[in-house]
Amino acid sequence: MAQGEQPKNFDWLPEGMEALADGEYDAIVMGTGLKECVISGLLSVKGKRVLQVDRNGYYGGDGASLNLTNLFEKFQAGEAPTNLGANRDYNVDLIPKFIMACGNLTKMLLHTKVTRYLDFKSITGSYVYKGGNILKVPATPSEALQSSLMGIFEKRRFRKFLIFVDQYDEANAATHEGRDLTTMTMRELYTAFGMQPDTHQFISHSMCLELDEAHMDKPALPTIKNLKVYMHSLQRYGTSPYIYPIYGLGGLPEGFSRICAIHGGTFMLNQDVDEILMKDGKAYGVKAGNQMATAKMVIGDPSYFPKDKVRPTGRVVRCICLLNHPVPNTNNAESVQVVIPGPQVGRVNDVFVCSLGNALQVTSQGIYVAIVSTVAEKANPDEDVTPGLKILGPILQRFTSVSTVMEPVSDGHDDNCFISKSFDATSHFESDCDDLLSLYKRVSGEDLDMNINADSVEGDY
């Protein structure tokens, strides 16, 4: 509150309580993670009065990007060694993910014009683990012909399959070639093109970004849609389908927060919430110490809500590793994604590896940060990430965390509590964007317009 400004007074304020910030809002958003900041930005653009609070003194929540000192402090690892370079050179993501160049998050960035605050670079390459080897996912026709992922006859079948997918239009039956992908399973579709099981696995896990084998016996359409986004993104940049913001993912929530602030939103860092105020089973505000604010809805990540509002769905293991070399067998790639399909290493769930270097302004010169993530299946989390750690070579320093993945028990319409899901174990944002779109619809009552050309994050939509 500005010096000399009188505290606001409202009829609903109990005696001894003060208004938190301006007191009355359309929405109170708890947390400054990416999902929460996207929602607050979108609501503010629609003219809604938004209050956003965060218990931390920085933006991003569990998805923040930390400098070297903060990284070592967070994992209680003592002081950072001097041989790792300057503290200011580091922006290490706690939850590492790449952005699909023509995917839904890119469309959201364009929709809100957040791209004007950020610079992006293309990720150098995408790889897949097969039979003990790290192999590049082909990015060009010539790479496909030279790839050892499949034999010469299988490459022809693979090419024929990609041509079918590329021209497939759900609304145009002439492109379906007599196949109904709403009933035909993914396994049946692969078999129809005569492709081998190893090829099924490579396409599904490294290109369609399926997390396990469950999709194989479900209708093929959702998986084919994922593949079309991958192919479109790959065509856009030519080296890989992924882009990444310079200085780390922490810039994303900050960018959306800036949009919200420009449109009148109020932000309060280092501000925890003691209680979500309820009346007749519906949330109507929040309480923090002797301060209160009211709103028509309360939005936030699961950590801000009582245990009866959320439920656990699993655990994610993430291991942040500092290296003095690129990931071996990736042609010295400055930035890379490696997908290790679960069945290749005796697991149900895939293991993901992201590696980033100094060119993206996230590490010091000569240092790389590689992050291994997967769904926990073992009692010992180190066993879960071992397949990823094995491909990294010598590791200077590693930090392991295990997070419980939470989701809301209801959609929020009955109690005015609109809760996001925790981030998953994947190294991309596509499934998280599905949750974001669902959250936006629940909050606003309408679908977010995603009919945006995502061909370039450099333009201004």
Image (cartoon, helix red, strand yellow):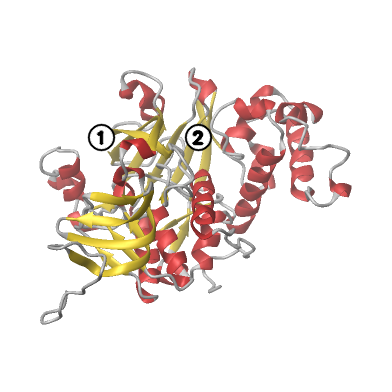
The amino acid type of the residue labelled 2 equals Val
Q: Are marks 2 and 1 in contact (CB under 8 Å)?
A: no
Query: Can you see residue 100?
Result: no
Q: Residue at x 66, y 27 (%)?
A: 216
Residue at the location (43% across, 50% down)? 418
Q: Quadrant of the C terminus?
A: bottom right
| Residue at figure coordinates x 73%, y 29% from the top left | 185
Quadrant in the picture for residue 25: bottom left
| Residue 43: percent from left, percent from top | 45, 66
The label shown at residue 398 is 1
Q: Earlier in the sequence, mark 2 or mark 1?
A: 2
Q: Secondary structure at mark 1?
A: strand
Q: Is residue 5 above or below residue 302?
A: below
Looking at the image, residue 154 lies above or below residue 208: above
Q: Which mark is residue 339?
A: 2
10 Å neighbourhood of mark 1: few (<14), some, or many (≥20)? some
As helix, strand or loop, the secondary structure at mark 2 comes to: strand
- The picture places residue 86, in percent across and down from the top left corner, at 18, 55
Q: What is the quadrant of the N terminus in the image?
A: bottom left
Q: Residue furthest bottom?
A: 4
Residue nearest the viewer, comparing 226 with 8: 8
The image shows a total of numbered marks equal to: 2
Q: Residue at x 55, y 61 (%)?
A: 107
